[in-house]
Image: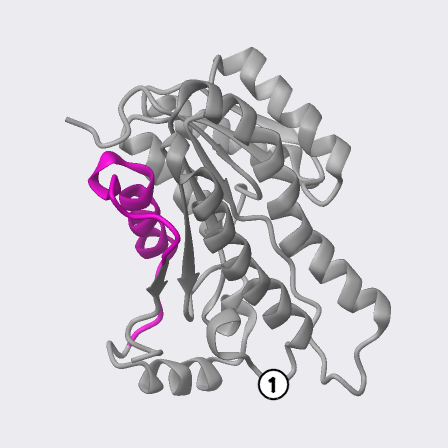
């Protein structure tokens, strides 16, 4: 029995990295997947083909999660196409790193808009249908940086810490309707983005992690499967750190 059989999942920012890992892992567990992408239609088409090859329905939507109206339209389109939304994964995110004394107001605002406001936008868009069906699982992608902070990432840390407070509040508001809301806080996850980093630096990071390795998108995706499925039916308002022991 697949853990997400006959479920419909909406995942933001799913054409690469962690988001892509979640989409593929959800499909392997039986979920049909609607996902958003920012610019690469080619990557979206490739993902649709891969998900469909796993025997589920899939569709990509070019949509800006940071735009309130676009998020409402997206949710309506997904409901029309798929009939329901059982799982929402708020994964869309960007970084614009700099020390606070050098960071521009625009770079602060952009990161808050994409990383935090998008969580409000999409959650707001799906809660009515979830309340109507009296079930749903909302999973918000935070970060180890949102839990402990990081020099040079005040904007990113603020956005990811904001997600933690938002998650707890939504869990309190919607628990009586059987809608659960949890956060996942990944640590150092190795994706195509980290491939561009200095490899000596990456080796040092790995050595500082108790499990002595970076995580994979699948490591994060497996945690999301747990939180999306009935396996976590009595878990809400929590933050699951997927970090190899970094915060231990």
In percent of width and height, residue 237 lies at 39, 53
Magenta range is: 213-238
Q: Is residue 57 above or below residue 3?
A: above
| Horizontal relation, residue 121 to residue 207: left or right | right
Q: Classify residue 137 as left or right of residue 165.
A: left
> In the rendered image, which quarter contains the C terminus?
bottom left
Against 202, is 180 above or below?
above
Q: Residue furthest right?
A: 105
Picture quadrant where residue 123 is located = top right
Q: Nearer the viewer, residue 213 or 5?
A: 5
Q: Residues within 10 Å of mark 1 (few under 14, many from 20)?
A: few
Picture colour scheme: one colour
Determine the residue positioned at 55% across, 25% down. Answer: 128
Query: Is there any visible trace of residue 92 in the rendered image?
Result: yes
Is residue 14 located in the magenta-colored stretch of the structure? no
Residue 144 location (% of width, % of height): 45, 71
Query: Which residue carries the number 1 mark?
Result: 151
Q: Position of residue 150 (x, y in %)?
A: 56, 81
For the image, the number of numbered tags is 1
Does the rendering let one see residue 179?
A: no
């Amino acid at each position: 029995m697949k853990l997400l059989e006959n479920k419909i999942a909406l995942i933001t920012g799913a054409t690469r990295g962690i988001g892509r890992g979640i989409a593929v892992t959800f499909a392997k567990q039986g979920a049909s997947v609607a996902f958003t992408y920012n610019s690469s239609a080619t990557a979206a088409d490739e993902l649709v083909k891969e998900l469909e090859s796993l025997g589920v329905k899939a569709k990509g939507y070019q949509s800006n999660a940071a735009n309130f109206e676009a998020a409402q339209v997206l949710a309506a389109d997904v409901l029309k196409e798929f009939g329901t939304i059982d799982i929402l994964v708020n994964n869309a995110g960007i970084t614009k790193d700099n020390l606070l004394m050098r960071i521009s107001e625009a770079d602060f605002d952009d990161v808050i808009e994409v990383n935090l406001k998008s969580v409000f936008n999409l959650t707001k868009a799906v809660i009515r249908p979830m309340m109507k069906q009296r079930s749903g699982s909302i999973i918000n992608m935070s970060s180890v940086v949102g839990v402990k902070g990081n020099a040079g990432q005040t904007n990113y840390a603020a956005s990811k810490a904001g997600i933690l407070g938002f998650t707890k509040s939504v869990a309190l508001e919607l628990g009586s309707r059987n809608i659960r809301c949890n956060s996942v806080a990944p640590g150092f996850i190795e994706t195509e983005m980290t491939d561009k980093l200095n490899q000596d630096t990456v080796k040092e990071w790995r050595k500082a992690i108790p499990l002595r390795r970076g995580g994979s998108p699948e490591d994060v995706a497996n945690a999301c499967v747990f939180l999306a499925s009935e396996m976590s039916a009595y878990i809400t308002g929590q933050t699951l750190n997927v970090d190899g022991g970094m915060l231990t």
